[in-house]
Amino acid sequence: MTTVSKPYRLSRGARSEFIGRHFGVLSISVVFAALFIFFSARADAFLTAENLVNVARQIAPTVVVAMGMTYVITTGAIDLSVGSIVGLTASALAILAKTGNPVLALVLTLLIGAAIGAINGALTAYGRLQSFIVTLAALTAIRGVALLITQGYSTPIESSFLLPLGNGKLLGLYTPTWIAIAIVVIAWYVFTRTRFGRYVTAVGSNAESLRRSGVDIRRIQMAVLIITGVLAAGAGIITATRLASGSSNSGTMFELEVITAVVLGGTSLMGGRGSILGSAIGALTLGIISNGLVLLRVDVYWVPIVQGIILIVAIFLNSKLFGRLVRSRR
């Protein structure tokens, strides 16, 4: 009896450990698969290669920014300014591109995102202000700057160097999709395989212990907001080049979509737990929901309503189910 039951208990414990460690990714993967099957069965055009390729391109900006937001939320902070950064950087790229130097325009646009992230980070980490308040104020101010420099008008982009960033194709996929894939791989490696990634998790789970070990947690808190600012600027570049114009209205309510994707993927809003792969799958889930509803001819105004409901349900299930799982493992 002993030789038979012991391996079974070990196997059961290993399964429990695996499920507990990857609960967020597994749960959102099940939801993604269920929705994919549902829309494939109900919408004739959903499963076509053209539609799936377009969905991957459209969701790329969300995937890109969700990678940075995963870092931010894992530290226990939040960044509500990403949508406004997208609007400002999309407008700035279009305006800067008119100077005739597209490379300089790209660099300056990314620097704008980094500068905004640095300001948010400095006020949060060194000014000891709540990230929610800081980035909420930035959300309004940055959008105002975008409207100011454009006077509310869109600026066309005609550069043959820039436009392929949003509309180019390689091996059947659009350039934004390849950019998103590259960002996911890099973000996953840094988050799971480097000291910085471990520090990010530690800041959210036990910042005081990390501080006592000699790590300047303020630098980590500032760094993640800078990274998110740069990635939001990258999303602004993708959006502007895909539409061939920069608009101050780009990225409106974008922060809701990004945060929803991250929370759906299993990252805790309380900090200390995050999943890069989960956030990527969460973003893809939102993408197929939006696309599937459109293909089913559901009124487009239902999309943000559905996303808001999903966010509430995700937060509830995330906290309740994961909390029970952790307690059962103890």
Image: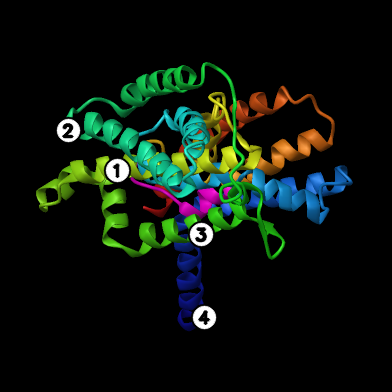
**Residue 321 in view:** no
SS for tag 1?
A: helix
Residue at which label 2 appears: 126
Write down the residue under mark 3: 182
* Cα–Cα gap, marks 3 and 1: 26 Å
Earlier along the polypeptide chain: callout 3 or callout 1?
3
Q: Earlier in the sequence, mark 3 or mark 4?
A: 4
Boundaries of the magenta span: 271-281
Q: Amino acid at mark 1?
A: Gly
Which residue position is annotated with label 1? 204
The foreground one among 105 and 262 is 105
Identify which residue is drawn at 82% across, 49% down: 40
Q: Position of residue 103 (x, y in %)?
A: 45, 49
At x 80%, y 44%, the residue is 39
Q: Nearer the viewer, residue 178 or 200?
A: 178
Q: Residue at x 28, y 45 (%)?
A: 223
Looking at marks 2 and 4 on the same chain, the residue that comes earlier in the sequence is marked by 4
Give whichever of 138, 156 is nearer the camera.
156
Of the two numbered discs 2 and 1 in the rendering, the one whose residue sits closer to the viewer:
2
**Nearest-to-viewer mark from 2 and 4:** 2
Report whether 41 appears left or right of 181: right
> Mark 4 sits on what residue?
4
Counting every numbered tag in the picture gives 4
